[in-house]
Amino acid sequence: MSSFAPRAGLSAAARITFAAGLVLFVVTIVVGILNGIDVWEPHHDTLMSHVHAGTLGWITLGVAGIGFLMFSTGRDVSDAEQRRSVTLAWVVTGAITLYVAAFFAGDAVFDDRIQRPIVGTVLFVVVVWFLVWLVGAYRAYADRSPARLGYLLSWISLIVGSVFGVILGLYLSNGEVPGLADDTAAAVAEAHPPAMVIGYLLLAAFAAIEWLLHDGGPRRAPTIQMWLLFVAGIVINIGFISGLEEELAGPANVLMIVAGVMLLWRSRAVLAPAGWRGAGAGIFPRFSMLFLVVYLVLLTVLVSWIIGGTIDFDAMTSSQRGLLLSFDHVMFIGVMSNVLFGVVAGGFGEARNPLADRILLWGVNLGIAGFAVGLMTVTPVLKRISTPIMGTALLVGIGAYLLALQRAREA
């Protein structure tokens, strides 16, 4: 597993975003548990805050934390840059927290929910600010690794998805977007979810796994992987915006599968039984790779439905809706959360509780597997059993890792 010094570089900024992300993740977990065991059906606004507290609050703040660590390891960081990075970390945290709150507020503030695109625009500016810092940090390395390239490309994809998100917010608030025809505005709005889940998160996952498990190895193959995924995200975006998703989803999916096969082949040693023994915190990114396989399989099924015209996203069957929800949760929990917990465990977890680690690792991964199967097979009892197992394990892990982050700060 890649080595990085948790008390050097920009670790102070990383601690801020990781800690804030873990706290916001509690919102996602509590709503998810109550909804998953079918004791409460949350209002749509609450459900959207649940989604964004996870995808932005936990995952994107965590990805920002990875960026602070990845782009300060192996280079000298001045005191001034450390201070600026802490400021940037607090600004990113504040903007994302406001965005989650804007969803939770629903129409309690404004009937048309206009606060969402307003706060979304503020968040977009902050995300661009982070990119400016990122480009400067990237250029400071004479030897630019594939992991850092992939991370940079993922953040560029996030900015594209953020633009689509602001347009989606305007479209839902007003039924139109100034300067855009109705058909164009609707198409761009529909491109937001795939731009975030495929273009941004998939690249971020590959970059983090590369950094944790392969940094310092051969450069050519992983560099090709990152560009394949970036191009695939662009193709998917073009497909949804132009209405050519049936024609372009297939080629984009092929690019992603090729990149995935390349990663698995290069990781065959670490995924072999001997590679798991004594892996320590490196066991988390190994589980992430296993769920990447599941994710790509589900994506291929979804793409086959799009190409065949057998799915209408406005009128899905129960099994289609279940597969789509499984697709999202496999990425959010199985792939990204495993990666993020691996970084926190490897970088700040010297004082963490081994029992909490085991509860987190096995409770989350068995829980998300059962949850996904329950959704896809429309088996409510399996979903009701798996949800509290996964949620409880996550809460235990959050408590343990917040404590570890605090102890790292004190140290």
Image (tube, helix red, strand yellow):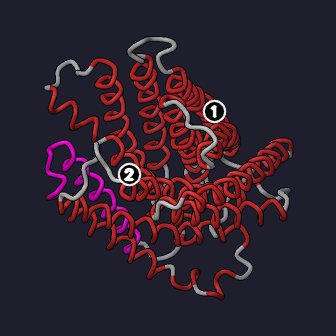
Residue 333 appears in the figure: yes
Query: Residue at left 16%, top 27%?
Result: 182
Sequence-wise, the earlier of marks 1 and 2 is 1
Horizontal and vertical percent for residue 127?
A: 45, 34
- Amino acid type of disc 2? Leu
Which percent across, then down, holds residue 374?
53, 62
Locate residue 248 relative to residue 326 in the image: left or right: left
Examine the structure image and report whether residue 312 is included in the region drawn in magenta: no
Residue at (29%, 17%) from the top-left corner?
Answer: 174
- Residue at x 78%, y 57% (from the top left corner): 349
Q: Nearer the viewer, residue 384 or 60?
A: 384
- Judging by the rendered image, the residue that carries numbered circle 1 is 80
* Residue 41 x %, y %: 56, 37
In percent of the image, x 45 and y 71: which residue is there?
A: 293
Q: For mark 2, give the secondary structure.
A: helix
Residue 392, percent from left and from top: 74, 52
**Snapshot quadrant of residue 90:** top right
Quarter that holds the N terminus = bottom right
Q: Is residue 207 visible?
A: no
Residue with the most extreme top position? 110
Gap between marks 1 and 2 measured at Cα: 26 Å
Residue at disc 1, secondary structure: helix
- Report the amino acid beneath label 1: Ala
Q: In the rendered view, would you say 325 is above or below 298? A: above
Q: Is residue 309 above or below residue 84?
A: below
Segment tinted magenta in the rendering:
220-246
Q: Nearer the viewer, residue 138 or 356?
A: 356
Q: Is residue 346 above or below residue 314?
A: below
Q: Is residue 253 above or below residue 190?
A: below
Q: Which mark is residue 153?
A: 2
Residue density around tag 2, few if under 14, some if 14–19, many if 20 or more, within 10 Å: many
